[in-house]
Image: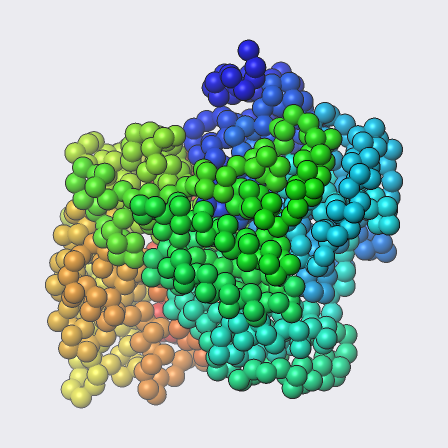
């Protein structure tokens, strides 16, 4: 019986047993993990048999041996951000990021670094920066992509004009063939090996083809870059292996070249009537030796402005070139920028010198792939992602490409590395419509012919993968294709390394994933409206394109996503991982059982419902809402966990307990009763229980009413009303001092937040409707409503319109404000002078993600205080951090940024945290009393 005739389950058993026998320790063939690794950032879905996370080079060798012995395919994976489908496979997926991720050595004199394959690009940069060095290539995914992955795809990034491709920066590679042969390769050097001798013979038989078809321009990445193996190029195997996509050997270590970063940078922003016009200007700009020359469509900028924040002033136009000029001499840089501007044919221009503005421009460019998914009315998909043509052909190519799109009734948003002739584009392929796959396939073949007609490359930096390998005969001759096959036959004769890619490829329309629809597949309707996805959870979770920003280290970025992944570094705890599992749940072939599937609940268990992804994810994933929907569907008509009945209905219990708060507090201070209370509530025994306020805020508050003053209303959330009243009283005094006629609602209606986070959406809908009923008369009268608890105010801003099909909810969403937002627009208000005070500020997750934190920062800066703004989450997140089973992760999240900052804070520093959860976490873990912004302003 041949290996190919053995059922996949049998192969899985064979290889898992063999891996165990050979001592590989981190091996996972669970359905959950297979779902997590079933796709990368591409349109393709291939379920692996098992995932291995090797802890050492020896375990890599053992994994290769197990695959060879059992005939199991092996696919290497870095960050899983591959857009071409070259990081997924049917057999073993070997994930280097978990353990093999270190920078081992930096040689300052030689300007080299020796790193593991799973080392994140940004980690290498962080290690090299204090030495005045950097790794040159910088893909837009530099915060999470790995050096090994960059070598596999021959990644380039925005500054390839200055620093070259990854292949140009490889100094040495340690690799292992599928036969188990270990090779230590040096760029430009020779290595004695029978395998390499056979490879040299293959090259010798195809010299004419290699010299005429390969290496014709800088971004020719498609196929095997055999030009590096020519005799005149020194038979450079190390450089050649860059871009072979893990199909020929498995990397175990690499040494890369480092460069010095010029200290002075300016960005010349040029505006054009169209992207094609911008492309026409590229040849005139290249003689000025820009570090980068990037093209950006106005639609991407508009999406960023709508969903992410303000954009620096840009010149007039519908498309722009960002031309970065760098150097050691600031006067020479400025002169070069002036001359380049004169040489351009732009309709308008602007020079950006401010580092903060430059950072925003580069952020827009880096998030282009995710932002592009929001630019089209329907879908905006990868698939024809990074074709490249010689730069002098780029304008003509773009016009003909646009005609091709229109001929196929498609639309796309082009952007990318115009200086290199490399174009990224997202297209509205109708994959979920009848005949959609045929449209997709036909278009790819026509697009490949178009690129080939301009002497271009199907891929300019992402590799061919499953998306383009079948198209290679349209770009290369039959002789070149045969050479690729011969090379594969030498290094991987059994076709076990990433099969289906480059040689003997899978069809471009095979293994396509989603976006599957869930409409009509539910017993009953969804609890949430999911307005941005037409009420379709399938479309919502397929917003995730896998770009992986959620797996980046967010320290210092003012980002929140994704707190539990930052603590565990486990793919299942990332936004992307959770989206993948939900996609598989909807698909139903691997993850079975629908909303109640254990894999789904395992993946969502550590989601803090922080909504960090809603803002930080370029594609707008809202995992907090999806988790609420899953819990809502899972527990319909069923017994819920104890914590749902107590913590999930905390405002109700607080209201009931309020008349006897003193007695309840006494009971919570009594050791035996306190333990019982924790058990009943499903609270971890290591957690303290917050005390109830002995008098409700609305009964303590004394409204300040005076004729002729503008009105404002304080809507007290349940936490301000029943637990922490000090912030509310301070807000009342601050607003009075600002000249307002302040009204405090005597019986504020609860927003239903805790019901939402525990998936009790029917009750939450009723509660939020009551809140809208109460607040709508004020907002329609133009009276600002001030909320003090960020999470509750965020419910009114976003969740209310998802729960209620009522136009009044939209009115309320637009009419409720934070204290800082009201004060910032109050004419004549002056902040207190806090010069000399140091503030350590922990924004609540919902402040950063839903409400925006700019107004709060502006108000605090106006006080003259020294401000240290923290990033990330406190780790408590409402009921999450107190629930049994979450304590360790909750503390680990706090240890990412919050707790170290508190320990290192200067003596006398004041900790500011508007969120009740944040203040509770600090009080619980480090015995620090944090205050609300209102209390700072009340000084």
In the rendered view, does 335 fall on the left or right side of 417?
A: right
In the rendered view, does 196 fall on the left or right side of 23?
A: right
Its colouring scheme is rainbow
Between 76 and 427, the one lying in front of the other is 427
| Residue at the outermost top position | 1
**Where residue 262 appears, x then y in whole percent?**
74, 69
**Where residue 846 appears, x then y in whole percent?**
36, 58
**Where residue 269 appears, x then y in whole percent?**
57, 78
Q: Is residue 646 visible?
A: no
Q: Residue at x 53, y 84 (%)?
A: 347
Is residue 635 placed above or below 532 in the rendered structure? above
Q: Residue at x 75, y 47 (%)?
A: 210
Q: Quadrant of the C terminus?
A: bottom left
Q: Residue at x 32, y 71 (%)?
A: 819
Between 657 and 890, the one lying in front of the other is 890
In the rendered view, does 529 fall on the left or right side of 154?
A: left
**Where residue 850 appears, x then y in whole percent?**
35, 61
Is residue 849 placed above or below 44 in the rendered structure? below
Q: Residue at x 66, y 57 (%)?
A: 219
User: How many numbered discs sit on the rendered protein?
Assistant: 0
Q: Is residue 705 visible?
A: yes
Is residue 76 placed above or below 650 in the rendered structure? above
Is residue 620 placed above or below 573 in the rendered structure? below
Q: Quadrant of the N terminus?
A: top right
Between 183 and 831, the one lying in front of the other is 183
Q: Classify residue 254 by image quadrant.
A: top right
Q: Classify residue 490 by image quadrant.
A: top right
């Amino acid at each position: 019986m041949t290996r190919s005739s053995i059922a996949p389950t049998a192969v899985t058993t064979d290889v898992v047993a063999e891996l165990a026998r050979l001592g590989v320790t981190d091996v996972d063939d669970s359905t959950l993990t297979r779902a997590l690794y079933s796709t990368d950032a591409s349109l393709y879905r291939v379920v692996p048999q098992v995932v291995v996370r090797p802890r050492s080079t020896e375990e890599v060798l053992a994994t290769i041996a197990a695959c060879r012995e059992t005939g199991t395919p092996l696919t290497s994976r870095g960050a899983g951000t591959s857009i071409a489908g070259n990081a997924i496979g049917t057999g073993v997926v070997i994930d280097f990021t978990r353990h093999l991720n270190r920078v081992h050595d930096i040689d300052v004199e030689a300007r080299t670094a020796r790193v593991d394959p799973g080392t994140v690009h940004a980690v290498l940069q962080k290690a090299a920066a204090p030495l005045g060095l950097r790794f040159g290539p910088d893909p837009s995914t530099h915060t999470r992509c790995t050096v090994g992955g960059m070598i596999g795809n021959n990644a380039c990034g925005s500054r390839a004009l200055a620093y070259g491709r990854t292949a140009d920066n490889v100094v040495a590679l340690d690799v292992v063939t599928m036969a188990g042969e270990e090779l230590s390769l040096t760029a430009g050097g020779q290595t004695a090996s029978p395998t390499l001798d056979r490879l040299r013979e293959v090259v010798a038989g195809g010299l004419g083809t290699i010299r005429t078809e390969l290496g014709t321009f800088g971004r020719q990445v498609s196929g095997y870059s055999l030009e590096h193996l020519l005799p005149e190029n020194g038979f450079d195997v190390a450089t050649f292996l860059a871009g072979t996509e893990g199909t020929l050997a498995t990397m175990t270590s690499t040494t890369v070249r480092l460069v010095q970063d010029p200290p002075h940078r300016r960005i010349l922003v040029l505006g054009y009537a169209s992207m094609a016009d911008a492309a026409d200007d590229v040849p005139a700009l290249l003689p000025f030796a820009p570090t980068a020359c990037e093209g950006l469509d106005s639609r991407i900028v508009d999406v960023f402005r709508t969903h992410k924040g303000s954009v620096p002033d840009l010149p007039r136009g519908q498309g722009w070139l960002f031309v970065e000029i760098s150097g050691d001499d600031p006067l020479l840089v400025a002169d070069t920028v002036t001359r380049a501007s004169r040489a351009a044919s732009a309709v308008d221009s602007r020079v950006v010198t401010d580092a903060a503005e430059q950072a925003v421009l580069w952020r827009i460019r880096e998030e282009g792939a995710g932002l592009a998914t929001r630019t089209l009315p329907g879908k905006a998909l990868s698939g024809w992602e990074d074709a490249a043509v010689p730069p002098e052909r780029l304008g003509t190519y773009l016009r003909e490409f646009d005609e091709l799109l229109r001929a196929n009734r498609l639309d796309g948003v082009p952007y990318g590395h115009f200086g290199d002739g490399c174009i990224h584009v997202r297209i509205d392929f109708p994959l979920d419509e009848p005949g959609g796959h045929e449209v997709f396939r036909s278009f790819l073949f026509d697009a490949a012919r178009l690129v080939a007609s301009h002497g271009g490359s199907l891929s300019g930096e992402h590799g061919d993968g499953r998306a383009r390998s079948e198209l290679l005969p349209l770009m290369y001759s039959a002789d070149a294709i045969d050479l690729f096959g011969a090379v594969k036959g030498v290094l991987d004769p059994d076709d076990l390394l990433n099969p289906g890619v480059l040689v003997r490829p899978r069809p471009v329309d095979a293994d396509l994933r989603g976006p599957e629809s869930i409409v009509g597949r539910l017993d009953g309707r969804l609890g949430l409206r999911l307005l941005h996805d037409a009420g379709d959870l399938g479309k919502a979770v397929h917003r995730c394109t896998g770009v992986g920003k959620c797996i980046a280290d967010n320290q210092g970025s003012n980002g929140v996503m994704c707190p539990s992944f930052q603590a565990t570094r486990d793919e299942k705890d990332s936004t992307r991982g959770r989206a993948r599992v939900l996609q598989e749940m909807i698909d139903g072939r691997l993850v079975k059982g629908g909303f109640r599937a254990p894999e789904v609940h395992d993946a969502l268990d550590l989601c803090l419902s922080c909504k960090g992804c809603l803002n930080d994810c370029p594609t707008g994933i809202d995992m907090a809402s999806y988790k609420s929907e899953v819990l809502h569907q899972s527990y319909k008509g069923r017994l819920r966990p104890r914590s749902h009945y107590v913590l999930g209905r905390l405002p109700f219990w607080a209201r009931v307990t309020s008349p006897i708060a003193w007695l309840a507090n006494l009971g919570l201070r009594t050791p035996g009763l306190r333990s019982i209370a924790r058990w009943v509530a499903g609270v971890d025994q290591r957690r303290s229980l917050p005390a109830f306020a002995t008098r409700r805020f609305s009964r303590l508050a004394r409204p300040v009413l005076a004729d002729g003053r503008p009105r404002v209303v304080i809507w007290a959330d349940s936490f301000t009303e029943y637990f922490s009243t000090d912030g509310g009283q301070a807000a009342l005094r601050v607003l009075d001092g600002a000249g307002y006629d302040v009204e405090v609602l005597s019986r504020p209606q609860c927003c239903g937040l805790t019901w939402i986070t525990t998936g009790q959406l029917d009750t939450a809908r009723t509660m939020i409707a009551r809140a809208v009923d109460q607040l709508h008369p004020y907002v329609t009268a133009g009276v600002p409503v001030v909320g003090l608890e960020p999470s509750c105010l965020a419910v009114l801003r976003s969740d209310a319109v998802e729960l209620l099909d009522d136009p009044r909810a939209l009115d309320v969403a637009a009419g409720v404000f934070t204290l800082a937002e009201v004060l910032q627009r109050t004419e004549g208000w002056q902040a207190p002078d806090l010069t000399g005070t140091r503030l350590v500020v922990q924004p609540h997750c919902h402040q950063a993600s839903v409400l925006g934190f700019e107004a709060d920062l502006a108000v605090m800066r106006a006080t003259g205080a020294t401000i240290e703004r923290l990033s990330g989450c406190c780790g408590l997140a409402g009921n999450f951090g107190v629930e049994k089973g979450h304590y360790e992760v909750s503390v680990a999240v706090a240890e990412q940024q919050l707790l170290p900052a508190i320990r290192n804070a200067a003596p006398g520093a004041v900790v500011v945290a508007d969120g009740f959860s944040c203040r509770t976490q600090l009080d619980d873990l480090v015995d620090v009393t944090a205050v609300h912004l209102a209390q700072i302003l009340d000084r």
